[in-house]
């Protein structure tokens, strides 16, 4: 075997073990007995040790020095393996294992604190997580910016300064649009009996409608919906709320966007570095364009209205236009995952600024709740009523995912670019969506983006699909046009 072949065979086993680690996380969120938390933490730590040892195996360096890529895809494989090897070598194995153990325990502490509205019960554990991530960031940054080192795990090549500049350009127009909308009459909301069985049945229909391959996936319930896995085993979760079926349906469509990306990658890349989404920003672009530009469009909601009536009977709104307005209503609310397209990015900007300050040491964990509440009041104009609607609402910090939040807004920006290109290239897209046919839209995304997996860097992935460099302009233009028409601005 050549050095390249030996390296790829070794990497395939490492990727398979990484999938097993991910399955442990999926089980913890969906099916694991509550009393198994401590044992699961040890299991996470053990497999983290194994993965760290494989990712720092000195043979990788030797193989990389000798390997010759057979083609462009092979060159991309070597580039990604080199990047992972160089980053992993900087982090001590003991630290990697301790992060895995601590974040596994922190997840359960967060869930209990959230359920009991007890911030004080969570903060000591969060303090440990922040300290560990800062230690990891220092090892990775080697004198550079700590937050940038963490962002690079989720959006290679991204930086806090670049993201801050983008958000600063977006914020004034979003705040102005929000203010103008909230000054207008609000549409009527849904009413009726939205039983869980009906929600889950329609959720499955929506997943299939957007191309989710149920032969290689499954849908379960979780407190915080997520997608897990890649290749031939890609699982999603959703949640139900009796008074709000949109929570279930759009959580499902959102996670299907993630899953479709993973299922759509060229099978030749299975269990290789190219066999997963290239970044969380690009990943989020898929979930957001599925959920918003497609799933909340006037065309698709007309079809969904009929499905809702068939499943639940009277839903409290008369006709597809009223239903479209209800789907896209802009109202005050605390929860990021339930936020409308206009206000969603304001939720992300709040989290981005706070976590950046935590990692920099400019904000202490003990002051986090007050800082959150102050910023929320300033941005949204009303006070947080309880911790589960504020600083305890998201799972991310308990899992140590610092640097992850900004990729949500970056994904919205990328989705805006992709939608502009999609409607240019597939002019009949809305005509087909009105019939419940997402094929032309999802097929375009698979052909132009999803199939390539990690072949290109994130920005190059978007530029290849769109034909131009990404910017926030298409997203802002889309939002102002859509909601200007909806609210007669």
Image (cartoon, rainbow, N blue to C red):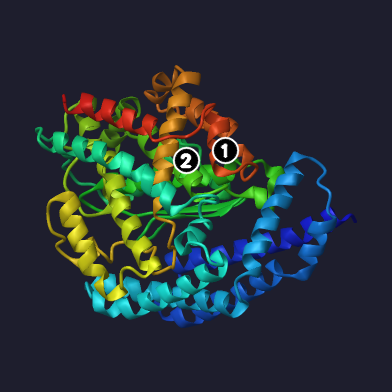
The residue at the point 36 percent across, 77 percent down is: 127
Left or right: 232 with respect to 127?
right
Foreground mark, 1 or 2, reads 1
Query: How packed is label 1: few (under 14 Cα within 10 Å), some, or many (20 or more)?
Result: many
Is residue 222 in sight in this rendering? yes
Indicate the position of residue 387 as horizontal and vertical percent values: 21, 67
Q: Which mark is residue 28?
A: none
The residue at the point 34 percent across, 64 percent down is: 357
Which quarter of the picture shows residue 111? bottom left
The residue at the point 70 percent across, 51 percent down is: 79
Query: How packed is label 2: few (under 14 Cα within 10 Å), some, or many (20 or more)?
Result: many
Label 2: which residue? 286
Which is more toward the observer, 255 or 458? 458
- Give the secondary structure at mark 2: helix
- Between the residue at mark 1 and the residue at mark 2, the CA separation in whole angstroms equals 12 Å
Label 1: which residue? 461
Q: Are marks 1 and 2 in contact (CB under 8 Å)?
A: no
Which quarter of the picture shows residue 419? top left
Is residue 203 in sight in this rendering? no
Image quadrant holding the C terminus, namely: top left
Indicate the position of residue 253 as horizontal and vertical percent values: 40, 42
The residue at the point 35 percent across, 56 percent down is: 352
């Amino acid at each position: 075997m050549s050095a390249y072949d030996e390296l790829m065979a070794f990497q395939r086993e490492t990727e398979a073990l990484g999938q097993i680690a991910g399955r442990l996380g999926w089980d913890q969120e969906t099916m694991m007995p509550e009393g198994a938390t401590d044992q699961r933490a040890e299991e996470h730590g053990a497999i983290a040790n194994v993965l760290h040892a494989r990712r720092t195996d000195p043979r990788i360096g030797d193989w990389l020095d000798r390997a010759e890529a057979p083609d462009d895809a092979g060159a991309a494989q070597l580039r990604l393996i080199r990047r992972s090897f160089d980053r992993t070598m900087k982090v001590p194995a003991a630290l990697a294992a301790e992060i895995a153990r601590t974040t596994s325990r922190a997840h359960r502490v967060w869930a209990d604190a959230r359920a009991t509205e007890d911030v004080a019960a969570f903060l000591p554990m969060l303090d440990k997580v922040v300290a560990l991530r800062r230690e990891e960031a220092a090892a990775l940054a080697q004198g550079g910016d700590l937050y940038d080192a963490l962002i690079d795990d989720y959006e290679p090549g991204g930086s806090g300064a670049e993201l801050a500049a983008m958000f600063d350009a977006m914020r004034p127009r979003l705040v102005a649009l929000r203010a103008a909308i909230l000054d207008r009459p609000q549409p009527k909301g849904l009413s009726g009996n939205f039983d869980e069985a009906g929600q889950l049945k329609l959720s499955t229909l929506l997943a299939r409608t957007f191309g989710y391959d149920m032969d290689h996936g499954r849908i379960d319930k979780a407190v915080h919906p997520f997608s897990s896995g890649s290749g031939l085993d890609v699982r999603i979760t959703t949640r139900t709320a009796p008074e709000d079926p949109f929570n279930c349906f759009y959580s499902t469509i959102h996670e299907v966007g993630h899953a479709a990306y993973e299922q759509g990658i060229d099978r030749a890349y299975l269990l290789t570095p190219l066999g997963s989404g290239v970044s969380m920003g690009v990943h989020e672009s898929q979930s957001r364009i599925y959920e918003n530009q497609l799933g909340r469009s006037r065309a698709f909601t007309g079809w969904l209205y009929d499905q809702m009536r068939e499943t639940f009977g009277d839903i409290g709104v008369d006709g597809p236009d009223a239903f479209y307005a209800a789907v896209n209503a802009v109202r005050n609310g605390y929860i990021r995952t339930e936020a409308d397209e206009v206000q969603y990015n304001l939720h992300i900007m709040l989290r981005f600024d706070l976590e950046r300050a935590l990692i920099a040491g400019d904000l202490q964990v003990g002051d986090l709740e007050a800082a959150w509440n102050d910023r929320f009041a300033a941005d949204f104009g009303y006070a947080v009523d309880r911790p589960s609607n504020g600083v305890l609402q998201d799972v991310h910090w308990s899992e140590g995912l610092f640097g992850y939040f900004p990729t949500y807004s970056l994904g919205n920006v990328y989705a805006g670019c992709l939608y502009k290109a999609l409607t240019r290239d597939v002019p009949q897209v809305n005509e087909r969506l009105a019939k419940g046919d997402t094929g032309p839209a999802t097929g375009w995304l698979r052909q132009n983006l999803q199939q390539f997996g990690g072949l290109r860097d994130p920005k190059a992935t978007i530029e290849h699909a769109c034909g131009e460099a990404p910017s926030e302009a298409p997203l802002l233009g889309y939002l102002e046009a859509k909601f200007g028409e909806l609210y007669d601005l």
